[in-house]
Amino acid sequence: MATAQEGIVELVGMLAHELADEPDAVEVKSTEVEGVLSIEIAVSASDIGKVIGRQGRVIKAIRTIARAAAAQEDFSVDVEVLG
């Protein structure tokens, strides 16, 4: 069975794939350091704006979803977008 952290990484990856025009270019990497799960979303240059959204609304929503899921399992998560 997948851990909660793996599930959150998969969720963030699924959201990024659905937002991107080039889903094959989306890469999601995660690392855990001192109880904080760090998720990095790499997308093509043409999709950065779609993943971030106007005034950062889309990435804020993704972060909120990830943090809510992580709070249920009692750990922290950070989500960043790389171009």
Image: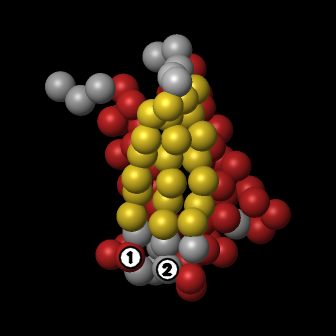
- Tag 1: amino acid: Ala
Image quarter hosting the N terminus = top left
Residue 46 locus on image (x, y percent):
56, 85
Name the secondary structure under disc 2: loop
Contact, mark 2 vs mark 1 (Cβ under 8 Å) = yes
Q: Is residue 44 left or right of residue 54?
A: left
Q: Residue at x 65, y 47 (%)?
A: 61
Category of crowding for the residue at label 2, using alpha-carbon neighbours closer than 10 angstroms: few (below 14), some (14–19), many (at least 20): some
Q: Residue at x 70, y 66 (%)?
A: 53
What residue is pinned by disc 1?
25
Residue 2 locus on image (x, y percent):
23, 29
Residue 40 locus on image (x, y percent):
51, 54
Image quarter hosting the C terminus = bottom right
Q: Residue furthest front?
A: 34
- Tag 2: amino acid: Ser
What residue is pinned by disc 2?
44
Q: Is residue 41 left or right of residue 54?
A: left
Name the secondary structure under disc 1: helix
Q: Residue at x 41, y 80 (%)?
A: 22
Can you tell which mark lies on residue 7? none
Against 55, residue 37 (above or below) is above
- Is tag 2's residue or tag 1's residue first in the polypeptide sequence? 1
- In this orientation, does residue 45 appear? yes
Against 72, residue 31 (above or below) is below
Q: Is residue 25 left or right of residue 72?
A: left
Could you give the CA–CA distance between mark 2 and mark 1, rounded to whole angstroms?
6 Å
Answer with the quarter of the image where residue 82 lies. bottom right
